[in-house]
Image: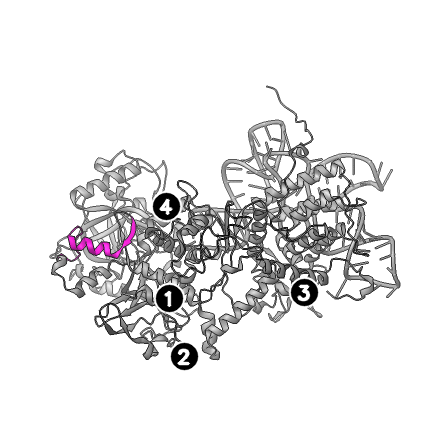
RNA sequence: GCGGAAGUGGCGGAAUGGCAGACGCGAAGGCCUUAGGAGCCUUUGUCCUGACGGGCGUGGGGGUUCGAGUCCCCCCUUCCGCACCA
């Protein structure tokens, strides 16, 4: 703010300059006194003398940022300010509050910058982290700074690697539905308690064979499996990192399905628990729903359909969620890629083949080949856009096991190779897709559930079974159960659950990530390093880039940056049987790894004996009663992490729980998605973005200089030239004004546009509060001790009660509105009374902490107000005026 | 297509089924000023009226109720997620 004439501004007015003096002073005070340090029950952060030692705890966390080179804009700290206001309030309300902050610092941008400039990613990352710390410090966020870390700190990723080893050394016991030590599995094989896959006994297996068997059970395992290979990036990607169009989320390069040897995590083993435990979480319903959809659990049955006349007694296994409709299965469909297709095709079209089924081909083999070719040529979009179902008859028939009917087997791309068994039984009467296909190919339709009168098309709803022998009359649920037990009794199938969720591809061909704590011996099988050898530090290299290829070169091979560092890759170690040469794993972990467990490390950040002391974990995150999952009390972040980060973190947390390292079985008890701050951007007639700052509005139109520009609404970003930074706001108004503005502009979970010109309203509010206490001309404190007018007193207590309620519910915008209302009521009074001003300052302190501390001092108090009791309303002052309602007497 | 969330002044947004528009921005007028892009005061949903007053108003249409922005039904629009998942 430019002061055109200093003499005109009263010398003791609350201005940006004054805020610029007050704010660093109090930030230094808090840092010096460790004001926001929270005591642990045990360990180096224990402090029995702390005013909140032994108090009820509250653990609040933000989704930590990735410190990008661009720095923060005003949208980034919205959630951080929200949690800061909440935790400051809760601290005053008597809680022992843990509110930490760290940095998610491994990842692609620093590496790409390194590839371009040769600067080591660590250098860039550290500079960015420092910049973020400075920007956040200016906002006066009340963190326990002893607990901060970056995921790139070796002292941190040592434990990321340790957790990887826990997962590597675990297997999932389906009977107990939990992860157990891999040694238990070996013991079960040795004693014969568990059957060894492959038919031979444990004693018959060689040492290498035994290792191979065991490796097949690990929760972290190497698999030669179809993965998403992205030549343009030179790395493989998780399914979650591939767009629906089949391109990389980063860089938008083509992605190819390729079979490659990669590390996988057996997250599918946890599918049931990841779905079921959502029920006990206090999360936004949309996020729970997105997780349920992503996991995609379907309950039903596997059913085997023998192939008619097959010399090798082939059968087609399908998965269905509607085993009750089996009597209505009038044909079958295999995915074009299904491996069985080639083995069941007869040499010639069977008698009675309808011409429309053949695709015009002379024999089934040609028909299928042609169909496959055309299906492969289609893009993903064409496959789904075109509503009309396509397909071709294989010439083969299968036998419906419930009634012995011969039903034709088709190949069609509406059946996906990657889901279920890649084959379906088609029940056109009860499935819309099958109905469509049946109409096109003139296949019989048999209803097996009574549809409502006049119903047209496939009926998927409830109703009594019909045309279904012994099932007739049963409801869908009963009929399913009955059919499943019939299938199991007669050996035609079993009840089954499938998931859309796939195992998690966990290795990346990148430099800037956690190295795996894995080496290989001469057998080529992986060996987990002993804990004593952690961390496996990321070595320096000359070239940070994986080998990248032409984006369309599907046949290229991954080559990791670490693999080129031969003296690191080849290493002599003593793993218990004397020094031997080993080969290191040269992939690194994906960026998600560090954020999968950071909520735990805050609890005991310096512990070098264990990940977190069980007592500290139980105190901060333990279950509060039967059925409570435990976890962080409030986790605030953007909805963009609804699936990936939150699913991975839940998975790791559950493994650690199963292995007895922690007492909570969910990481985040309550989740809150803050909204986004968006911004206007402006383009001129040519479509060129102009700096938003310099655009002026006249009569609802927008001008950049003389030319009119068009306004659009979207994200804040460099390319849209509409970035506003918190630093600018601190310079122009002060951090307190900025904080109040962000909290007052609307509910925390709603997205809204940034408007710099509206910030002044928050500054006026703080100025008025200041003026109630301080004479602007003399600087004298003008607060008196006379009792409040009864009407104002009632307002005061109404405000106190309302603010408390709002704060508890994270409704900061209405809390601030109430404080403004009280301030406006006090403003016309001849002198502000201490009776009102002390509670007002205390209530304001979560939002404008520096100003409040300063005023608290002026009101005659020493030290910080951070541990003062938050005002409480006197119930006697809350008695509402009675209102008479008309009452109807019947 | 399926699922979810939401539609209130010029703008951001308030309203346990009980005076719609709290609070803020903007705008208009005034005070103070050489000056105002500072500060302070007043007004500000909309229409009729000189005024006092009054009519109409929460996306649209029905309904429940003494009373509906709020509850129920139908429709429209916007945003988000998923998308041939058997």
Quadrant of the image occupied by residue A603: bottom left
Q: Chain of mark 2?
A: A
Please report contact status of discs 2 and 4: CB closer than 8 Å, yes or no: no
Q: Of residues A40 and A295, which is closer to you in this image?
A: A40
User: Which residue is drawn at the image coordinates 25% and 35% (left, top)?
Assistant: A472
The nearer-to-camera label among 3 and 4 is 3
Quadrant of the image occupied by residue A688: bottom right
Report how far apart the C-alphas of labels 1 and 2 lie in the structure.
18 Å
Element carrying mark 3? helix
Q: Which residues are magenta?
A: A177-199
First-in-chain label (1 vs 3): 1
Q: Is residue A197 magenta?
A: yes
Report how far apart the C-alphas of labels 3 and 4 lie in the structure.
49 Å
How would you rate the neighbour count of disc 3 (Cα within 10 Å): few for under 14, some for 14-19, many for 20 or more? some
The percent position of residue A137, horizontal first and vertical second, equals 59, 62
Q: Of residues A458 and A209, which is closer to you in this image?
A: A209
The percent position of residue A444, horizontal first and vertical second, equals 26, 47
Mark 4 highlights which residue?
A: A276
In the image, farthest residue toward the front: A49
Mark 2 highlights which residue?
A: A543
Report how far apart the C-alphas of labels 3 and 2 lie in the structure.
41 Å
Q: Chain of mark 4?
A: A
The percent position of residue A855, horizontal first and vertical second, equals 70, 52
Report how far apart the C-alphas of labels 2 and 4 lie in the structure.
46 Å
Please report contact status of discs 1 and 2: CB closer than 8 Å, yes or no: no
Mark 3 highlights which residue?
A: A731
Same chain for labels 1 and 3? Say yes or no: yes
In the displayed structure, A832 sits above or below A361; it is above
First-in-chain label (1 vs 2): 2
Mark 1 highlights which residue?
A: A589
Quadrant of the image occupied by residue A458: top left
Element carrying mark 1? loop
């Amino acid at each position: 703010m430019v002061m055109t004439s200093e003499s005109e501004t009263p010398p003791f007015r609350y201005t940006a300059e004054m805020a610029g003096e007050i704010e660093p002073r109090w930030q230094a005070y808090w840092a010096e006194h460790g004001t926001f340090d929270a005591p642990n029950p045990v360990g180096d952060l224990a402090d029995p003398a702390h005013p909140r030692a032994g108090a009820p705890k509250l653990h609040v966390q933000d989704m930590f940022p990735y410190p990008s080179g661009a720095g923060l804009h005003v949208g980034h700290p919205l959630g951080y300010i929200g949690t800061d206001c909440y935790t400051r309030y809760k601290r005053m309300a008597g809680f022992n509050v843990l509110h930490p902050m760290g940095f998610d610092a491994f990842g692609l941008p620093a590496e790409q910058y390194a590839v371009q400039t040769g600067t080591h990613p660590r250098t860039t990352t550290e500079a960015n982290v420092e910049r973020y710390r400075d920007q956040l410090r200016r906002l006066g966020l009340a963190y326990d700074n002893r607990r901060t870390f970056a995921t790139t700190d070796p002292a941190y990723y040592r434990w990321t690697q340790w957790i990887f080893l826990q997962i590597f050394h675990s297997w999932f016991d389906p009977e107990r539905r939990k992860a157990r030590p891999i040694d238990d599995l070996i013991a079960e094989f040795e004693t014969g308690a568990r059957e060894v896959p492959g038919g031979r006994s444990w004693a018959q297996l060689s040492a290498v064979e035994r290792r191979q068997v065991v490796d097949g059970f690990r929760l972290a395992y190497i698999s030669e499996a179809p993965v998403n290979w992205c030549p343009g990036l030179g790395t493989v990607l998780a399914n979650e990192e591939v767009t629906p169009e089949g391109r990389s989320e980063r860089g938008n390069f083509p992605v190819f399905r390729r079979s490659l040897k990669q590390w996988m995590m057996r997250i599918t083993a946890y599918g049931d628990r990841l779905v079921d435990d959502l029920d006990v979480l206090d999360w936004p319903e949309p996020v729970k729903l997105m997780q349920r959809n992503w996991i995609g659990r379907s309950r039903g049955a596997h059913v085997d359909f023998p192939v008619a006349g097959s010399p090798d007694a082939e059968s087609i296994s399908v998965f269905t969620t509607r085993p009750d409709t089996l009597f209505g299965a009038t044909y079958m469909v295999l995915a074009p890629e299904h491996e069985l297709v080639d083995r069941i095709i007869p040499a010639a079209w069977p008698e009675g083949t309808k011409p429309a089924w053949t695709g015009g081909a002379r024999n089934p083999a040609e028909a299928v080949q042609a169909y496959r070719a055309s299906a492969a040529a289609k893009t993903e979009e064409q496959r789904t856009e075109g509503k009309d179902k396509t397909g071709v008859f294989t010439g083969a028939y299968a036998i419906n096991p419930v009634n012995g009917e011969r039903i034709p087997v088709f190949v069609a791309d509406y059946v996906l190779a990657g889901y279920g068994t890649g084959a379906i039984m088609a029940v056109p009467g009860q499935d819309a897709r099958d109905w469509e296909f049946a109409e096109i190919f003139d296949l019989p339709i048999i209803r097996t559930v009574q549809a409502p009168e006049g119903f047209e098309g496939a009926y998927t709803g409830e109703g009594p079974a019909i045309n279904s022998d012994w099932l007739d009359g049963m409801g869908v649920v009963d009929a399913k159960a009955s059919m499943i037990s019939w299938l199991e009794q007669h050996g035609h199938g079993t009840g089954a659950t499938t998931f859309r969720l796939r195992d998690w591809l966990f290795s990346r061909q990148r430099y800037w990530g956690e190295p795996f704590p894995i080496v290989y011996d001469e057998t080529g099988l992986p060996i987990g390093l002993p804990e004593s050898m952690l961390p496996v530090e990321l070595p320096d290299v000359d070239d940070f880039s994986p080998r990248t290829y032409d984006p369309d070169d599907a046949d290229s091979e991954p080559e990791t940056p670490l693999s080129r560092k031969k003296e690191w890759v080849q290493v002599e170690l003593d793993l218990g049987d004397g020094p031997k040469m080993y080969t290191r794993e040269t992939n690194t972990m994906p960026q998600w790894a560090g954020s999968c467990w950071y909520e735990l490390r805050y609890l005991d950040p310096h512990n070098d004996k264990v990940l977190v002391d069980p007592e500290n974990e139980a105190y901060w995150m333990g279950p509060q009663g039967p059925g409570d999952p435990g976890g962080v009390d409030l986790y605030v972040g953007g909805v963009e992490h609804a699936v990936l980060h939150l699913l991975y973190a839940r998975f790791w947390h559950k493994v650690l729980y199963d292995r007895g390292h922690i007492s909570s079985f969910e990481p985040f008890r309550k989740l809150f998605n803050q909204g986004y701050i968006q911004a206007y951007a402006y383009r001129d007639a040519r479509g060129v973005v102009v700096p938003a700052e310099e655009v002026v509005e006249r009569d609802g139109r927008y001008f950049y200089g003389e030319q009119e520009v068009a306004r659009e609404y979207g994200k804040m970003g460099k390319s849209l030239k509409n970035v506003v930074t918190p630093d600018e706001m601190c310079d122009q108004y002060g951090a307190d004004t900025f904080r109040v503005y962000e909290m007052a502009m609307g509910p925390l979970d709603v997205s809204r546009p940034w408007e710099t010109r509206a910030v002044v309203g928050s500054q006026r509010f703080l100025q008025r509060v200041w003026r109630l206490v301080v004479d602007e001309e003399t600087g004298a404190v003008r607060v008196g001790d006379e009792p409040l007018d009864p009407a104002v007193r009632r307002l005061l207590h109404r405000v106190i009660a309302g603010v408390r309620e709002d704060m508890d519910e994270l409704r900061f915008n209405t809390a601030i509105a109430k404080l403004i209302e009280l301030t406006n009521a006090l403003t016309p009074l001849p002198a502000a009374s201490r009776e009102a001003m002390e509670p007002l300052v205390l209530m304001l302190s979560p939002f404008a902490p520096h100003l409040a501390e300063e005023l608290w001092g002026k009101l005659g108090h020493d030290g910080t107000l951070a541990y003062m009791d938050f005002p409480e309303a006197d119930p006697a002052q809350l008695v509402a005026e009675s209102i008479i309602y008309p009452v109807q007497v019947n």
